[in-house]
Image: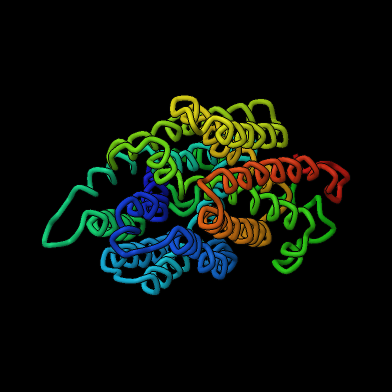
Amino acid sequence: MPYLVVLYVIAYLDRVNVSYAALEMTADLGFSAETYGLGAGIFFVGYFLLEVPGAVFAQRWGVRRLVCRIMVSWGVLAMLMGFIQNAAQFYWLRFLIGAAEAGFFPAMIVYLGQWFRAVDRGKAVAWFMSAISLAMVIGGPVSGALLKLDWLGLEGWRWLFILEGLPAVVLGVSVLFFLTEKPQDAKWLPEDEKAWLVAELDRERLAREAMQARKPTVWQALHDPRVLLFSAAYFFGLIASNGLGYWLPTMIQSLSGFSNLTVALLVSLPYSLGVIAKIAAGWSSDRMRERRWHTAGLLLLGGAGLGSLVLWQGHLGIALACLCIAVTGLTGYTPSFWAYATSFLAGTANAAAIGLINSIGNLGSFAGPYAMGWLKERTTGYAAGVLVLAASCVVTALLVLVARRFERQDGKSPS
């Protein structure tokens, strides 16, 4: 798990470091708020196009080779971001980085499903997805420091992209040597433990398949109403979380007027709490064998934090407390959400479902940052955009609660 967390920290940092670069890049290149919002979000258009194929390839061809290809290609493209000169180059590279990274997250969810029983999967997903918050915690101070660089005539934001893209290339190659594909291949596991784990995972897989009249195909999985419902829920959830994440540094700078480094450090504060919330929520969800209310409750908490931010934006201390509440809810809900969403299909069909949920969901990651930029250009400040994010939290919570109505073929709820 620590190795997987490191991989995802690097992946997520290369995805969101543009939010720190924007503190200087937008002024240097003359980008408007709408231009930045479109460039930040267009990453997820390329991501959307290749997500489902990536998930299916992970199931059929193996995670190790796929993740190696993904990390090396996105690392090279992320480094090229340090050389952009205009909006067109900004858009194209963000699009290509998204296309290159597509498949990484669903491949990791597929991988965790090959190693962890359903009863343990909430904790496993929580540890893995803690990388999102850790990337923001680590990325804040590191990115703030890199913005101060002035080497070889290149601005600090350019070095930020170059130096933060390099680890993806190195770690991508390391995957071929360090990532064990399945428990059956683990030479480091004692034979009795290996046999027990393989038997447990096989028993769960056969039980899921037995619940269905016949094994679903990929195409049938993509038409399953539960998959479509979770896809819609994740879409609105990511409108909120990434709409906030990509604008958080500039929002805090606007509220405070602090330096780039201080702003980057302040961004780390709510995400530090998010790490704790994510792990605690995953542990609690597994212990109580309950997914639905863990997910919806944290989403409503995030929405409350965002709504309160609009009311208290003129008071810096209270506004930062509201941001901490919002980020806690928006990061904490994901482990129970994914444990819930992956509880009713098996094999390649499940991989395709994961890919579709993540793919459609991440269109929300395009809509959120772009909507924030568009609304900022046409209104005063961030209030209108933040209210849209708060409403998205509520919609996601309602969709998750409705999921119980979509019963499995054996007449039971999927959680």
Of residues 401 and 306, the one drawn nearer to the viewer in this rendering: 306
Q: How many marks?
A: 0
Indicate the position of residue 4 as horizontal and vertical percent values.
Answer: 42, 46
- Judged from this view, the residue extending furthest toward the right is 411
Report x, y in % for residue 385. 57, 48
Please name the residue shown 30% across and 60% down the image.
169
Q: Does any portion of residue 212 appear in the rendered image? A: yes
Front residue of 348 and 43: 43
* Figure check: 17 above or below 390: below
User: Do we see residue 282 in this rendering?
Assistant: no
Q: Nearer the viewer, residue 28 or 168?
A: 28
The image quarter in which residue 80 lies: bottom left
Task: Measuring from the top left, give residue 158's x and y in whole percent.
Answer: 25, 59
Which residue is depicted at the point 42% across and 66% down? 94
* Image quarter (top left, top right, bottom left or bottom right) of the N terminus: top left
Q: Residue at x 43, y 47 (%)?
A: 186
